């Protein structure tokens, strides 16, 4: 006879005893490991929400296998759900410890995840102790976060030793490099920090890095509630599992799977499901989903551990399991937070007199998190010290002369921007393009094409939101997010700012001026052509243009492309020349 214990996920339940004969291990679905590896790829690509969904899907295929639980923990941690992540890593470790030799290989990874969660939660001493217990076991992935914990604890010599040991094992470890940089003074420390930033995984425009970022500031909501699902298992002669939904919303139906196999559906209470009479020794998974109207209201389940003689057999091909475990280890590589790296880099640059480089790093910090430490105050002070200050007076025309500044808002946009560039190239005209950050980030090739054609790039905010509704810090973040994208793509820094819709206040202009931007409006607007035949609209627009005019045009779907050929020809016929805003300002 075999003794069985039941571990409930997300709810409380009593232990049960199951008498089952010794049988072969329950077969599992073949798609489990490929799905785990696919989820790992999503996590490496800085897509934790999608990775979470895939790991959960894999988990429901094999509820009793630790890799899926580890992956869920990593995805939750990457989303900032630290407490949930700790629970998932603990579940994975418990399963691994009692599983096959194959499953036990995942235990160190689960313990690493838990230790990093403790660091995220500010429990540095506890996390450091757990990491220190992992590193002698030959688990090199623990070395870099251990060095981080050493440094946070003030033990610089231990941090140096562990960082160097980590780099000996993995020379491109961004976290270990960043710690070595912080411990190395002067230009060499700056070089190491730049290298760490280059190696930092994930998008360069996102505050947290992918992997187990230390610390991570992102927060996510909306996950199905596990705490509202209760699973009671009764091993009477009927072998029944009863599922109780504790939520307020009435479910449409509840599904239950056993070891990844569909075991039943219930749409009326009491929600009871039959279980296999002889599941065999080992750990078995019972997974429950509570469905509303097309959405999952909650998830829960239970582990069923049936003890048999000897060690539980491996359930997967050894090479495939090892590959999935390595993918998961790679996706869970502890990484530094990019906001912190740029802040440390700014301080290091300032310390050796590289004020321009320091300013650039502070600007990147504020672009990601304007409330981080004193980065915004330091940035504004450096802008003032370096003479990088814009005007608080809005510009709507340039000094009177037979010159016109053509300005194009809202791009870059595929096809539309390319057509505008073709027309300007044919007319040998230079213009100024006020780009939107989200568009610029999506189409860096078009940014480079604008710059290569000799045009000027200017700032139309990142989101194209109403700037009047934003705080000064938020206005600066909008401008700096776009500035970072433009600088990365072209090496150019915009200096002109046009608020979306022209909506601005003195506070908006002051916030922009403090970081080197001058607000630009217009004296002629293509919108006067709306709803008119092309030639009539063109005449109305020409009537608005006077010497020194700033003409508002667009990269979007309006009348710009219809009137632009005629506008260029007519202005040339009237003796006008064309220039960028900086050329008009004599800069």
Image (cartoon, rainbow, N blue to C red):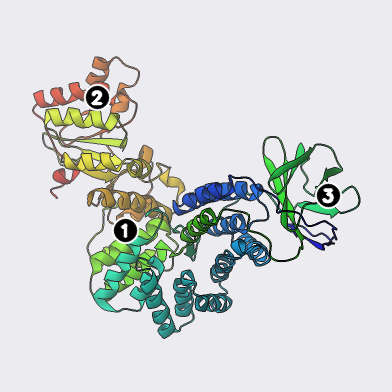
Within the image, what quadrant is residue 294 found in? top right
Within the image, what quadrant is residue 343 found in? bottom left
Q: Secondary structure at mark 2?
A: helix
Residue beneath label 3, please? 277
Mark 3 and mark 2: span between their CA atoms?
83 Å
Task: Identify the disc placed on residue 464.
Answer: none
Mark 1 and mark 3: span between their CA atoms?
73 Å
What residue appears at the point 45 percent right and 50 percent down from the top-left corner?
Answer: 470
Percent position (x, y) of residue 512?
33, 53
Percent position (x, y) of residue 401?
11, 37
Residue beneath label 2, please? 541
* 472 sits left or right of 550 in the view: right
Residue beneath label 1, please? 514
View extreme (right): residue: 237
Q: Nearer the viewer, residue 67 or 515?
A: 67
Percent position (x, y) of residue 382?
28, 66
* 554 sits left or right of 20 in the view: left
Regarding residue 80, the answer to whether it shows in the image is no
Q: How many marks?
A: 3
Instruction: Say above or below: 182 vs 328.
Output: below
């Amino acid at each position: 006879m075999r003794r069985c214990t039941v571990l409930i996920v997300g709810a409380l339940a009593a232990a049960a005893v199951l008498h089952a004969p010794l049988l072969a291990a329950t077969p599992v679905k073949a798609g489990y490991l490929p799905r785990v590896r696919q989820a790992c790829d999503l996590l490496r690509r800085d897509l934790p929400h999608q990775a979470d969904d895939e790991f959960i899907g894999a988990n429901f295929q094999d509820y009793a296998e630790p890799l899926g639980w580890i992956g869920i923990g990593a995805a939750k941690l990457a989303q900032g759900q630290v407490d949930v992540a700790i629970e998932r890593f603990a579940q994975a470790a418990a399963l691994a410890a009692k599983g096959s030799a194959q499953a036990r290989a995942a235990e160190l990874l689960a313990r690493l995840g838990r230790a990093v969660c403790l660091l995220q939660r500010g429990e540095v001493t506890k996390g450091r102790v757990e990491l220190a217990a992992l590193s002698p076991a030959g688990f090199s992935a623990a070395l870099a976060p251990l060095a981080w914990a050493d440094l946070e604890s003030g033990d610089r010599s231990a941090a140096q030793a562990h960082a160097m040991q980590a780099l000996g094992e993995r020379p491109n470890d961004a976290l270990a490099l960043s710690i070595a940089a912080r411990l190395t003074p002067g230009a060499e420390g700056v070089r190491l920090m730049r290298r760490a930033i280059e190696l930092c995984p994930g998008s360069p425009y996102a505050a947290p890095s992918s992997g187990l970022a230390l610390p991570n500031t992102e927060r996510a909501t909306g996950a199905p509630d596990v705490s509202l699902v209760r699973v009671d298992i009764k091993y009477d002669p009927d072998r029944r599992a009863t599922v109780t939904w504790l939520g307020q919303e009435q479910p449409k139906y509840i599904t239950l799977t056993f070891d990844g196999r569909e075991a039943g559906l219930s749409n009326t209470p009491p929600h009871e499901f039959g279980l296999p009479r002889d599941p065999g020794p080992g750990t078995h998974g019972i997974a429950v989903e509570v469905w509303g109207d097309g959405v999952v209201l909650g998830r829960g389940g239970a582990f069923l551990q049936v003890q048999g003689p000897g060690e539980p057999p491996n359930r997967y091909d050894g090479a495939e399991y090892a590959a999935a475990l390595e993918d998961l280890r790679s996706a869970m590589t502890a990484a530094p937070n990019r906001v912190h790296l740029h802040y440390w880099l700014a301080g290091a640059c300032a310390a050796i007199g590289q004020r321009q480089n320091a300013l650039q790093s502070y600007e990147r910090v504020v672009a990601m998190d304007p409330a981080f430490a004193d980065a915004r105050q330091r940035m504004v002070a450096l802008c003032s010290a370096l003479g990088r200050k814009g005007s608080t007076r809005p510009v709507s025309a340039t000094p009177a002369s037979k010159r016109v500044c053509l300005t194009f808002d809202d791009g870059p946009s595929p096809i539309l921007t390319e057509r505008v560039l073709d027309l300007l190239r044919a007319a040998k005209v230079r213009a100024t393009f006020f780009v939107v950050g989200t568009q610029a980030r999506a189409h860096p090739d078009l940014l480079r094409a604008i710059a290569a054609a000799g045009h000027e790039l200017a700032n139309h905010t990142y989101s194209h939101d109403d700037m009047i509704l934003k705080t000064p810090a938020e206005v600066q973040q909008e401008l700096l997010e776009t500035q970072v994208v433009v600088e990365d793509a072209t090496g150019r820094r915009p200096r002109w700012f046009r608020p979306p819709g022209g909506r601005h206040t003195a506070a908006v202009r002051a916030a922009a001026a403090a970081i080197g931007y001058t607000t630009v409006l217009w004296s002629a607007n293509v919108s006067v052509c709306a709803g008119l035949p092309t030639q009539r609209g063109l005449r109305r627009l020409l009537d608005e243009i006077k010497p020194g005019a700033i003409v508002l045009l667009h990269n979007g779907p309006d009348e710009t492309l219809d009137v632009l050929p005629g506008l260029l020809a007519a202005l040339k016929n009237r003796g006008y020349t064309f220039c960028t805003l900086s050329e008009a300002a004599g800069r």
